[in-house]
Image (spheres, grey):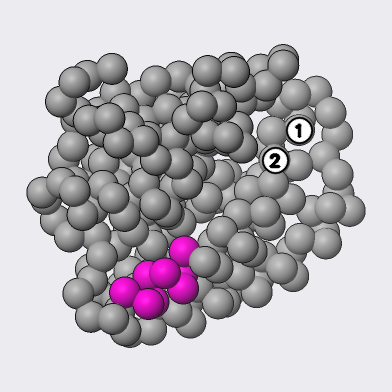
Amino acid sequence: MNDEGPALYGAPYSVYVRAARLALAEKGVAYELVPVDVFTPGGPPAEYLKRHPFGRIPAFEHRGFRLYETGAITRYVDEAFSGPALQPASPEARARVNQAIGVLDAYAYRTLVWDIYVERVVAPAQGREPDEARICAALPRAATCLGALEQIMGPGRHLAGAALTLADLHAAPMFACFATTPEAGPLLAAYPKLGRWWESIAGRASMTATAVA
């Protein structure tokens, strides 16, 4: 591991690893991405469990300080390194950031990524039929998630106000997966402000730099 810069442990395919990478990229922080694949036979290496006892990704280390959980990592990155602030100053605006991240973690991730993207895109790539019933059941929940996020946006052009925040970086990897499905277009059409947000965030340099090859 680089003695000066931080190390991020995980796999590029993970939306949560990418969220942490986006925060690092937006702050202009050089880091080492240490490969960890939790889906290998036998699960994550035993050594990795010392970094993350639940065996998930990402984990993080900076100058001997170890951390896991994406929200904790991205907040640390924002506060420990110079660069543009990714959390607003006022308690109200910061609460909106945390609210959006809470919605994404509790509701949107499972619905948009696992129930729709994985079944529609990943399953055929792995040689199995999509679970159409699971996808169908997820569509109303997806609409609820999108509607909630658009409502949280308010008058700003980002998820939690006028400026880019950790909420945008938390959401972007999930939307990058979801947007590859045929279900995404009709759903996002019902939430045009959120659709414009996605078009804008998808073109950022940090998204290009962290895209899975």
The amino acid type of the residue labelled 1 equals Ala
Give the residue at x 31% y 74%. 94
Q: Nearer the viewer, residue 46 or 184?
A: 46
Left or right for 119, reference 167: right
- The earlier-in-sequence mark between 2 and 1 is 2
Q: Is residue 59 above or below residue 204?
A: above
Note whether residue 67 is visible.
yes
Circle 2: element type: helix
Give the residue at x 74% y 70%. 140
Residue 150: horizontal and vertical position, in percent? 48, 76
Asked whether the beta carbons under mark 2 and mark 1 sit within 8 Å of each other, the answer is yes
Q: Which residue is mark 1?
A: 123
Residue 156: horizontal and vertical position, in percent? 30, 78
Give the residue at x 39% y 52%. 72
Q: Which residues are magenta?
A: 94-101
Q: Which residue is mark 2?
A: 118
